[in-house]
Each structure stands twice: as structure tokens, then as C-alpha cells.
């Protein structure tokens, strides 16, 4: 894993992707810092972090699109899959290398609260805990982008799909207003989401039988539940989509001034899930 980590980290800076990523993150943050904290005089750097979450939509796809897609396109992934290196070591090495690149601008952010202190009042506990939550949120998005990159050999498709997923997560709180509230509407929406999940499972496993069984079992369970107690489906999708609003944890740190331990555990859990899914995707390709 150490060798993979060093190789990947070096490749990000020899290809200039790492430098562009760091420069972009620091530049955008610097602009917002000047406006919010220096011009308007807000004493919380956490306000700036909350304002720049949208940069993940652009920066993360650029950072993650090549991690596995490039390996598949150049056929160098065959060397990794047939070597003595364990799959989880490959995945973790790549993930930690991208997290290390992201850590560089985050460490630079640690100086901004000190600059605020030089100007007057500062709130170090809120600001530095918000920086921690911001870093973990970025790692969540990196794990999602890494998983999507493992599904295709096209870097463009990996970047676009990552952007699309992150956009949905970013807008999740507002999208709840457009979802149906009726039980039958939520049932149809749930079946559609189930179908999408089954297609992803088929894309990973290439197993038609498993996919059909999961689809039929899911639809049957949904219909039976609807017939028994349809009220359970009222506003179901809105409630679920609201929980996908990952930025809410950062909001607790930055605006509610709460040290949300359960939110940090939630971030770590999502990272674990997508790292695990990436490992399983590569395991399937190793044995197929």
C-alpha cells in the first residue's frame, strides 16, 4: 500500500493535476475569505468553508477521474490485478493519495483563523472543528468519485458521473420540495430507485440471475408493504433524500456551533462503504 500511495501521490504532481487542484481550492477559498472575513468582518472562518462547498463539484471530479479509469484505459490495471498486492491495499493506497492531495489546501486553511485573530476576535474551536468536518466531507466525495472511476475506463464519463452524483447530493435539501408526497408517487419513485441500484449491481457483478432476483424481491416487498400500510410511503422519498444532504453535518459545525460527533461517524461510515464497494468492483474484475 505504501508503494501505491507514493506512486499515486507523485503522479498527481508530475501531471500537474495536484498542483491545479491545490491552487484552485486555495484561490477560491482566498476570495471568499477576503469577502466574508476581511471585508464584511465576519469573525468565523467556518462561514467561508460553508460558502465554498460548491467547489467540490468541480475539484473532486478532476481529482478522482483518473485514479482507476486511466489504469483500465492503458491496461496497466492488469499488472495490479495479477500482482501479489492485495486489492484493498491498491484501493486504500489510491484513496489516501487523493486524500493527501486534498489535505494540502486544508492545512493551508488552518492559517486563516490566525489571520482573523490578528484583526480582532476569532473562534478557534468552531473554525478548526469546521475544518475537520470540511476535510472529512471532501474525503466522502473522493471515495464516491473513486468508486465511479472504478466502473469505467473513460475519464470523461468518470468525471461527469461524479459531478452528477455530487450535484444531486449538493442540491438534495432543495430537491425534496419537488418530490411527490403521495403514497403511490413515492412507491413509483422507490421502484425506479431500486431499478437503478439493481442496474449498478449488475454492472459490478455481471450476474443477470442475481439482478433479476433482487429486482423482483424488491418490487414484491414494496407492493406488499404498500398494500398492508400505504401510509408508510407518504413523503418517504423526501425524508430519504433529506438524509443524503451530507453538507448538513458541516452546517452543524459552521453555523450551529455544534461538535457533531455522530455526523463525523456518518462521514467515516460513508467513506468505508464506498471504499468497500470499490474493492468489491476490482475483486470482481480480478476473478472475471
Image (cartoon, grey):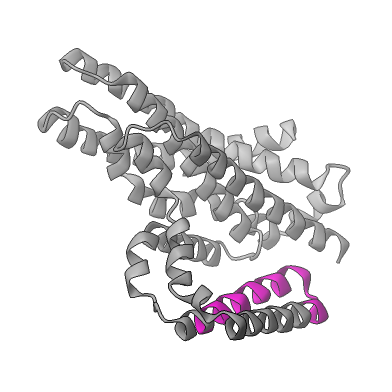
Image quarter in which the C terminus is found: bottom right
Snapshot quadrant of residue 34: top left
Query: How many numbered circles are shown?
Result: 0
- Give left or right: position of 120 versus 221: left
Question: Which residue is depicted at the point 27% across and 44% down?
Answer: 51
- Give left or right: position of 187 versus 147: left
Question: Which residue is depicted at the point 71% across and 38% down?
Answer: 4
Q: Nearer the viewer, residue 236 or 278?
A: 236
Residue 66 showing in the rendered view: no
Horizontal and vertical percent position of residue 181: 39, 77
Horizontal and vertical percent position of residue 278: 69, 54
In the rendered structure, which segment of residues is drawn in magenta? 188-210
Residue 78 showing in the rendered view: yes
Image quarter in which the N terminus is found: top right
Please tell me whether residue 205 belongs to the stretch shown in magenta.
yes
Question: Which residue is depicted at the point 50% across and 60% down?
Answer: 162
Snapshot quadrant of residue 92: top right
In the image, residue 145 sits, relative to residue 216, either above or below, namely above
In the image, residue 187 sits, relative to residue 20, either above or below, namely below
Amino acid at each position: 500500500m505504501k508503494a501505491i500511495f507514493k506512486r499515486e501521490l507523485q503522479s498527481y504532481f508530475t501531471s500537474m493535476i495536484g498542483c491545479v487542484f491545490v491552487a484552485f481550492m486555495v484561490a477560491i477559498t482566498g476570495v471568499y475569505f477576503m469577502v466574508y472575513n476581511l471585508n464584511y468582518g465576519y469573525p468565523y472562518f467556518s462561514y467561508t468553508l460553508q460558502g465554498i462547498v460548491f467547489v467540490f463539484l468541480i475539484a473532486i471530479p478532476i481529482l478522482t477521474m483518473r485514479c482507476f479509469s486511466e489504469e483500465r484505459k492503458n491496461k496497466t490495471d492488469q499488472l495490479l490485478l495479477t500482482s501479489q498486492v492485495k486489492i484493498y491495499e491498491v484501493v486504500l493506497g489510491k484513496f489516501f493519495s487523493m486524500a493527501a492531495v486534498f489535505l494540502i489546501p486544508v492545512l493551508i486553511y488552518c492559517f486563516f483563523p490566525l489571520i482573523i485573530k490578528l484583526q480582532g476576535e476569532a473562534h478557534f474551536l468552531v473554525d478548526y472543528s469546521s475544518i475537520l468536518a470540511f476535510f472529512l466531507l471532501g474525503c466522502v466525495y473522493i471515495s464516491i468519485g473513486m468508486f465511479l472511476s472504478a466502473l469505467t475506463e473513460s475519464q470523461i464519463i468518470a468525471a461527469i458521473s461524479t459531478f452528477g452524483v455530487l450535484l444531486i447530493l449538493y442540491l438534495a435539501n432543495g430537491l425534496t420540495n419537488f418530490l411527490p408526497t403521495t403514497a403511490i408517487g413515492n412507491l413509483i419513485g422507490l421502484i425506479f430507485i431500486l431499478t437503478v441500484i439493481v442496474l449498478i449491481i449488475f454492472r459490478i457483478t455481471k450476474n443477470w440471475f442475481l439482478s433479476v432476483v433482487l429486482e423482483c424481491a424488491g418490487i414484491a416487498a414494496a407492493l406488499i408493504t404498500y398494500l398492508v400500510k400505504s401510509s408508510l410511503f407518504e413523503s418517504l422519498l423526501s425524508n430519504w433524500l433529506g438524509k443524503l444532504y451530507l453538507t448538513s453535518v458541516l452546517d452543524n459545525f459552521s453555523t450551529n456551533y455544534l461538535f457533531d460527533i455522530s455526523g463525523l461517524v456518518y462521514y467515516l461510515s460513508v467513506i468505508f462503504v464506498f471504499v468497500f464497494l470499490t474493492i468489491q468492483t476490482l475483486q470482481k474484475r480480478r476473478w472475471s
